[in-house]
């Protein structure tokens, strides 16, 4: 297995006083000389290549992650795409200050999604970001030596061991745990356990050996033609990357926090910041509110600013400042007015993931033909495991009693209640139901199965490897989509004919 170790920068590559990233070729040479024999003995099945060719705008050519810009995500992604055909996995050495931002952005740069959030060019190999709280090497009068008291070697070797698991997604390895990249956040500047994931268990862990965690990894491409191994898929990803790189820093997304202030003023501070962001050319504004995404209403000044932003064509998303926060449907009186401004909720995405996803998708919108409404829906859909998906069942998934699907626009719902399955419009009106308890199982076609195993209903429409997606609001539609882009709508019978078997 051939693994490319991309040297991007960060504390793990630093030396000297004050600490600063050393030139990439010097770091790569030290790694080969001082670590090569040990790594070869530990991982005899791995062929390691230290890639020192990535360059950033700095004196050393490496990235001090404090100075990370969105365009730097594109540089890392391009390096991966350029070497994709020649390697089986990638380990990116990155600074910890913004490692979670890069780990959240890369899934949207290395995958291409259609308007429904289905992958059309899909990552098929591991991409693991890692780094260290202390440098990997120490400068002495005799040259560089291994910093035995640091965490760099353990993180590098752990990342390599996890790469051998071939989990096909972007992840982040630190202190023995492999986190989904779009779910991780930095939580400490002093502990070796610098990262955590509030809503998602580790994908894998390393200790005495390496083992898969409790969280299910992404499945990877549903068809070989969709994998980045295929030159056509890789060309599609490269074309999207070109478009993102050309625009991501010209029309940025701006994150603004809600903080205690006198919001009853006619022109409160947060409203002034929203107007300023719009005036400076922001493409989107991410507001980090309290609790479930609540924002102070005050005298209506913030609401007015959000409406002005919406009128100016700026997309607004509301997240939560709470580490384990989840934005609902703005139920509290303190935030119920938000829905009327055109803003959308970030669900259970971390603010880091929401910012990275928002930035990349906004920059890719014109290239991919997404209008503002389409962008809003994609921001609420689970594309690469960054949030809990509510609008679909994938192959092998089960909708159990007490669970529900909700369309991405937040309107229609398919509720699996204690008495059965009910499809409702956005205003709560039932349009179809199955009045016996059971579970909805998605395989080649959806089937509703009773507790005793009897099949109460099964669609006649079948698409191997299909995904069941709930769309719409006043007219909810259940649709099957397959990897080739084929669509099979499920025309369920009206509720007055609930005894009839729904047809395809």
Image (cartoon, rainbow, N blue to C red):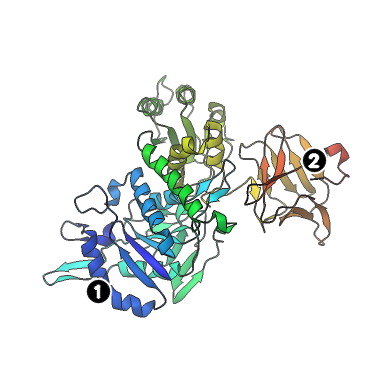
The percent coordinates of residue 15 (x first, y second) are 20, 61
Secondary structure of residue under mark 2 = strand
Categorize mark 2 by other alpha carbons within 10 Å: few (<14), some (14-19), many (20+): many
Q: Which residue is mark 1?
A: 34
The quadrant in which residue 469 appears is: top right
Q: Are marks 2 and 1 in contact (CB under 8 Å)?
A: no
Q: Is residue 131 left or right of residue 504?
A: left
Single out the mark in the foreground, 2 or 1.
1
- Quarter-of-image position of residue 192: bottom left
Q: Residue at x 28, y 67 (%)?
A: 150
Where residue 436 appears, as percent x and y from the top left, is 83, 51
Number of labels in the image equals 2
Question: Does 167 sit above or below residue 462?
Answer: below
**What's the distance in space between the residues labelled 2 and 1, CA to CA?**
67 Å
Q: Point out the image quarter for the N terminus.
A: bottom left
The residue at which mark 2 appears reads as 432
Tell me what residue is drawn at x 38 percent, y 51 percent: 78
């Amino acid at each position: 297995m051939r693994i490319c170790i991309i040297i991007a920068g960060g504390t793990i590559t630093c030396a000297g006083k004050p600490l600063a990233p050393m030139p990439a070729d010097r770091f790569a040479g030290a790694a080969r000389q001082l670590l090569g024999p040990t790594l070869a003995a530990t991982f005899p099945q791995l062929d390691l290549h230290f890639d020192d060719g990535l360059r950033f705008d700095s004196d050393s050519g490496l990235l001090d992650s404090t100075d990370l810009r969105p365009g730097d995500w594109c540089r890392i992604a391009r390096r991966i795409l350029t070497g994709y055909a020649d390697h089986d996995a990638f380990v990116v050495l990155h600074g910890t200050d913004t490692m979670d931002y890069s780990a959240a952005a890369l899934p949207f740069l290395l995958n291409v999604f259609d308007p429904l959030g289905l992958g059309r060019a899909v990552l098929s190999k591991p991409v693991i970001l890692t780094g260290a709280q202390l440098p990997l090497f120490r400068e002495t009068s005799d040259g560089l030596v291994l910093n035995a008291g640091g965490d760099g070697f353990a993180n590098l070797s752990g990342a390599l061991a996890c790469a051998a698991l071939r989990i096909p997604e972007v992840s982040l390895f630190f202190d023995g745990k492999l986190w989904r990249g779009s779910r991780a956040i930095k939580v400490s500047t002093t502990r070796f356990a610098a990262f955590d994931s509030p809503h998602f268990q580790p994908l894998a862990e390393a200790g005495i050996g390496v083992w898969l965690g409790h969280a299910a990894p992404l499945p990877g491409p549903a068809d070989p033609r969709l994998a980045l191994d295929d030159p056509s898929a890789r060309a599609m990803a490269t074309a999207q990357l070109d478009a993102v790189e050309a625009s991501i820093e010209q029309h940025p997304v701006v994150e603004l926090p809600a903080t205690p202030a006198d919001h009853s003023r006619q022109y409160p501070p947060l409203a002034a910041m929203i107007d300023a962001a719009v005036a400076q050319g922001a493409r989107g504004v991410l507001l980090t509110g309290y609790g479930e995404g609540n924002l102070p209403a005050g005298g209506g000044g913030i609401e007015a600013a959000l409406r002005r932003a919406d009128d100016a064509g700026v997309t607004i998303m509301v997240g939560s400042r709470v580490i384990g926060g989840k934005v609902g449907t703005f139920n509290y009186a303190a935030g119920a007015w938000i829905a009327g401004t055109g803003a959308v909720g970030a669900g259970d995405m971390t603010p880091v993931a929401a910012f990275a996803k928002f930035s990349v998708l906004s920059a890719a919108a014109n290239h991919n033909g997404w209008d503002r409404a389409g962008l809003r829906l994609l921001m609420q859909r689970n594309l690469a495991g960054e949030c809990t998906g509510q609008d679909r069942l994938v192959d092998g998934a089960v909708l159990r009693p007490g669970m529900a699907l909700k369309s991405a626009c937040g309107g229609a719902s398919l509720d699996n209640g204690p008495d059965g399955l009910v499809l409702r419009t956005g205003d709560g009106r039932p349009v179809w139901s199955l009045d016996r308890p059971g579970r909805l199982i998605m395989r080649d076609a959806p089937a509703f199965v009773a507790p005793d195993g009897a099949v109460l209903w099964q669609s006649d429409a079948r698409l191997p490897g299909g995904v069941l997606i709930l769309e719409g609001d006043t007219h909810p539609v259940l649709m099957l989509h397959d990897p080739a882009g084929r669509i099979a709508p499920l025309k369920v019978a009206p509720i007055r004919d609930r005894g009839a078997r729904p047809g395809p």
